[in-house]
Amino acid sequence: MNLDLLAKAKSLGFSDRQIAHLTGQTEDAVRAERKAVGIIPSYRLVDTCAAEFEAYTPYYYSTYDRGDDEVRASDTRKVMILGGGPNRIGQGIEFDYCCVHAAFALKEDGFETLMVNSNPETVSTDYDTSDKLFFEPLTLEDVLHIYEREKCWGAIAQFGGQTPLNLALGLQRNGVNIIGTSPQSIEVAEDRKLFAAMLRKLDIPQPPNGLATNEIEALAAARQLGYPVLVRPSFVLGGRAMQIVYSDAELTHYMRFAVEASPERPVLVDKFLEDATEVDVDCIADVGQFADPQGGTSVIGGILEHIEYAGVHSGDAAMVLPPHTLSQSVIETIRTYTHAMARELKVIGLMNVQYAVKGDTVYVLEVNPRASRTVPFVSKAIGVPLAKLAAKVMAGKTLVELGFTAEVWPKYWAVKESVFPFNRFHGQDILLSPEMRSTGEVMGLDADLGIAYAKSQMAANAPLPLSGRIFISVSDAHKGEVAEVARAFADLGFELISTSGTAAVLEKAGLKVRRILKLTEGRPNALDLLKNREIQLVINTPAGQTPRTDEVRIRTTAVYTGTPIMTTLSGARAAALGIAALKKSGYGVRTVQEFH
Amino acid sequence: MPKRTDIHSVLIIGAGPIIIGQACEFDYSGTQACKALREEGYRVVLVNSNPATIMTDPEFADRTYIEPITPECVEKIIVRELAELQRLGATGKLVLLPTLGGQTALNTAMSLHRSGVLEKHGVEMIGANARAIERGEDRQIFKDLMIEIGLDVPISGTAHNLAEARQVAEQIGRLPLIIRPAYTLGGTGGGIAYNREEFEEIAKRGIELSPVSEILVEESLLGWKEYEMEVMRDRADNCVIICSIENFDPMGVHTGDSITVAPIQTLTDKEYQIMRDASFAVIREIGVETGGSNIQFGVNPDNGRMVIIEMNPRVSRSSALASKATGFPIAKIAAKLAVGYLLDEIRNDITRETPASFEPTIDYVVTKIPRFAFEKFPQADPTLNTQMKSVGEAMAIGRTFKESLQKCLRSLEIGRSGLGGDGKPWRIGNEVYGDRDILPRDVITRKLSIPNAERIFFIRHALRAGFSLEEIFQLTKIDRWFLTQLKEIVDFEEELAASVK
C-alpha cells in the first residue's frame, strides 16, 4: 500500500487492525509490510522535564512521531510481564497484585523485568515496581513491538487475568516464549471437549453438560440434562452473561438476547447442582518442568468454602478459609483431584479449581491454570506469597528449591466478603447470581469464626446489628429451614417481623412473630419500616427466577437505607454466628505479622 | 527544614475495599507512602481491610492490620500501638497520616478527631490538619472562603432538609440544579435535577446519604468546560503545579466518568496562568500545609467566566493519574512533606538532579478514558451524570492528542481498535449496523445530546453522517478544538478507505 498513507495512519494512532479493515488486508499483512519498510514505533521517556535533564527511571511510551529512540540497551535476561489493563468487574486489583509480585520475584532472581500495562490506577505502573515500565495498550500489535524491540527471553501471561491470556496464543504464534504452564494446557482447561476427556481419564466427575451453538441445540441440551441448567458463553471472566435457567422460555430468551453464540464461540450448558456447596482451591505446581510428570511438586495454597450455596459467582460469594463445614473425606477427595489435575495439565505456576460438593460427591466445575482472583486473599491468609513463588517457578526454580512443599492449614479463620456498587445503580436488583457484580473485597481475620465473619461485614460497611428487629421473608423452597435460622436470632434477643406466609411457618415452630402487611396488602409495610430505620437486618431469599416486584423493592430499599441484608439462608446463619460471638466477647485487633 | 525527629511511628489508614470512586489508585498511593516513610526510618503501622492490595503485604509495613476501617476499630489499633511503643521504650510519638487512603481514611480520621479520640490519646494528624480538611470538605465553608479571597464560585446554598432545599432553589431561581451531598464519595447520592419533581427526589436522597445530612444546591454549569489542577505545598509555603488536566466532556459528567487529557489543551497561556495563581490561592487559604490537593475549575465557553468547583485536600484519584502522566510520584512526595521535608529538599528520582520543587514539564499528550460495566446492571440508567459510574480506566500517551486518544481507545478492551474503521459492528437496541454504515440522524442526535459511555464513537458517526462541527458542538458542548481533532481522524479514515478503491 501507499507508504506515506501508512506512515500517516500510524502517526494518527491508527492500529494495524483498523488499517487492515479499511484497506481490505489482514492485520498480519499490515504488520509485515510496516516492518519490511521500517515503520515501527520509537520509545520515549516519561521524565518530568521534557528531556531537559537526563532521566534515570525507565518509564516509556511508544510513538510514531519518528525520532530518537530513548530505550537503553542491556544484556540481562529479560522477562515481560503482561498486566491486566483497565479494571472492570471480574478483573481488578487482584491481578495487579499478582503482576507486581511477579516483577519483585524475578528482579530478586536476577532477571530484568518489563511491565506492560495501560491502567494508571495500579502499583504495577509505578516506575519503581519493574526495571522497565511500558505504558502501552495490551494488544498483540503493541506488545509484540516491545517484545521484539527489547529481545525478551520470555513473557508471563498468566498473572494479568483474561486480558493477557487472550493474547497468549497469538503472541506464541509470533515467536513469543510464553513461560509457565503452556498455552496448550490452558486450552485443555478452557475447551469443553478436551477438558471433559481429561476428567474422564482421571475419573473425576463433573456436572452433566452439553454445548450449543444455537437456540435449537441449547434447548435440546437442556431437555436432556433436565432443568435447572447453568448457561454461559465460553472464554469469559467474571461470569459475563452467566445465568441459571429453569425453563424453555427462559432459555430461549437467553439465547436470543443475552449471548451471541456461534460455532467458534459456543454456549456451555451445565446441569445446575441446587443447594451444593462451592469450593475454590488455589494450587501451585512445578510439574511441567519435569519430563516425568510424577517428578514435580504440587502444593495446595488454600481451600476456600463458599458461604452462599452454588449459583453465586465465586467473585461475589463470601468464603471461609479453611473450610468450616466440609468433612475430612471430602477435603481429601478435593486434594486428590487437585493434585491429579495439576499433574495432568503439567502446571508450572498457579492453578485455580472450582468444585461443587453435594453430599459426598465432589464435582469439578472449572479449572483455570493461572493466577486467580483469590490468590492475594489466600496468600495473606496462609502467610505465603503464592504469586511470588509462582513467578519464580515459571522462570525455572522448583518448589523444593523454594522451600514450599507442604500445605499450610491456618489455626485461625479468614473470611472474604464482597462489596457491591448497588448504591450507584438505583433500581437494579441486588440478588447474587452467577454473573459477577462486585467491585471489591475485604477480609476478616480472627481465631473465632463468628468474629471473623462479623469483622468482614464491618469492613464491607454493613456491620451486623447486635439488637433490634429482623424482617424475614423467604421463598417456599426455603420455608423448611427458615425456622431454625429465625430461632437463632430470637434466642439472641431479636424481634422477628414477617408477612403472612413466612410468619405462619415461624409461628408453627413456636416462635413469636410480629406480622406486617405485604406491599400489595397496604401500609405500613416493610418499606415503611425500612425507611423509618425500624428494621436492623433483612433476610430475604428469592422466590425463583423471575423475582416478584415487591421483593425487588424490599431489597433495593434495604440497600438504599443502608440496612444489612442477607439473600441466602447460609448467609443469615453466618450472621447469627457472628452476632452471637460479638455479643459474647466483643472483638480485638491483631497484626498480620502476629498471625503468621 | 530536616525531617521530624519527634515521630517514632506513623499510622497510615488505607482505603478499604475497591468501590466505584475509590479504586486501586489508593493502593498505589499507600504503597508509595509506606516505602517512603520506612526509607526515612519511621516505623509504619497500617490498617486496611482489603487483602488484594500490595500495601497489606507483610513486608510493606512494620505492623499490618487487616481489620475493618471504622473509627472504633482504628481506636483499638491506636490503643494497642501506644502500648506497643511503651513496651519498645520508644521516645517518639505515634502520628496519623489520613490523606493517602481516599475519602474513607479522611472520614475515619475526622470522626476520630470530632469524637476527641485523637486528643485523648495524644495522636497528631500529619499531612493535613483537621481545620484544613473541614475547610476543604465542607462545601459552604469552602465557598465562603473562596469568595473572601476574591474567587468566583457557582451560586449555591446548603440545606439540611427539604424545606431548606426548596428555599435555596427559589433563590437560584432556575433549573436545572446540581445537588451535591457533603462528605460522600464520587458524588454518591448527588445528581442533576431538570424539574421540580426530580429536584425533590434527589435532594431527599442526598440528605439521607450524606453522613452529616447536608447537601449543596448549586446553579447548573452544564456545558461549561471543566479543568483540574494537581497542586502541592510544603510548610515553607512553596507551591507547585504537578499537572493540569482538561475534561473532554463538559460539566455535568463526573470527572471520574469523563475522558480527560493532560496537559490542558484549549486554554491560552494567560488563562492557564490565572488558573495556576488561583490554585495556589486556594491551597493557601484552605490551609493544606503539606501535601497534595486537587482543585476543580469550570469555565464558561461563551464569556470565559472561571469558577472554583471543589477541592480535595488529599491525594485523590486524579493524583494517581497525574503521577502516571508526568512521572512525578505525588504520594511519595506527599508522605515526605508530611514528616517535615520541604519540596526543594527532596530529590526527583527521575532526573536525580532536579528537586521536587521543579514543576514537571511534559512534551506529549496523555488521555484517560473511563471503563464502564453497564452490561452488568441492565436495569439501571446508563446516562452519565454527576454520580460516578465507571469501574476502571485506561490511560495512553502519544505525541499528539490524536495518537494518544486512539491508543487509549484500543487500551479499553471493549472490542474497539481505535475510533473507527475496525470492522466491529454496532448494536443499538435491537438494530445492528456495520462499522462503516451511516447511522440514522435521530439515533446519533440522541447519543450526542445525552452523555453516555459511547458518545465519543457517535461523534465519529455524526461526522460521517454529515453533521457539521457546529451542530455537534451544540449537541455536546465538547470544545470545538477536540471536535476538530476527531474530524481529522475521521477524514483520514475516509482517505485510507478511498485509497484502495
Image: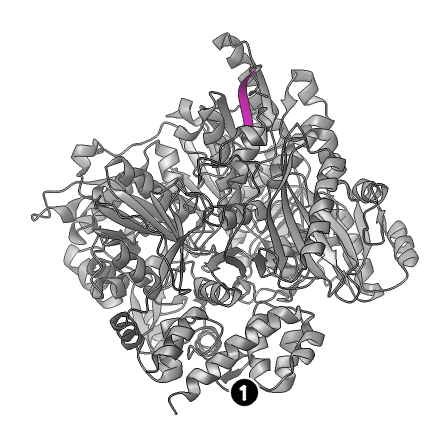
Q: Is residue B367 above or below residue B108?
A: below
Q: Quadrant of the N terminus of chain A?
A: bottom left
Chain under disc 1: B
Few, some or many C-alpha atoms within 10 Å of disc 1 (few <14, some 14-19, many ≥20)?
some
Image position, residue B469 (x, y; %): 65, 79
Quadrant in the rendering for residue B75: top right
SS at circle 1? loop
Q: Pick whichever, A170 or A308, lies toward us.
A: A170
Image position, residue A478 (x, y; %): 52, 53
The reply, left or right, for residue A298 in relation to residue B409 is: left
Residue lying farthest left? A292
Quadrant in the rendering for residue B125: top right
Whether residue B386 can be seen here: no
Quadrant in the rendering for residue A593: top left
Residue lying farthest front? A52
Q: Pick whichever, A514 or B335, lies toward us.
A: B335
Query: Does the magenta stretch mainly form a helix, a strand or a loop?
Result: strand
Residue B409 is one of the magenta-drawn residues: no
Q: Is residue A510 above or below residue B221?
A: above
Image position, residue A380 (x, y; %): 39, 35
Give the residue drawn at x 51%, y 42%.
B328
The stretch of residues the image draws in magenta is B7-11
Give the residue drawn at x 21%, y 66%.
A173
Whether residue A596 can be seen here: yes
Give the residue drawn at x 46%, y 35%.
B353
Q: Is residue A40 above or below residue A444?
A: below
Would you name the residue on which mark 1 appears?
A: B438
Q: For the residue marked with disc 1, what is the amino acid?
A: Ile
Q: Is residue B387 above or below residue A396?
A: below
Residue lying farthest bottom? B501
Image position, residue B160 (x, y; %): 84, 45
Give the residue drawn at x 24%, y 52%.
A152
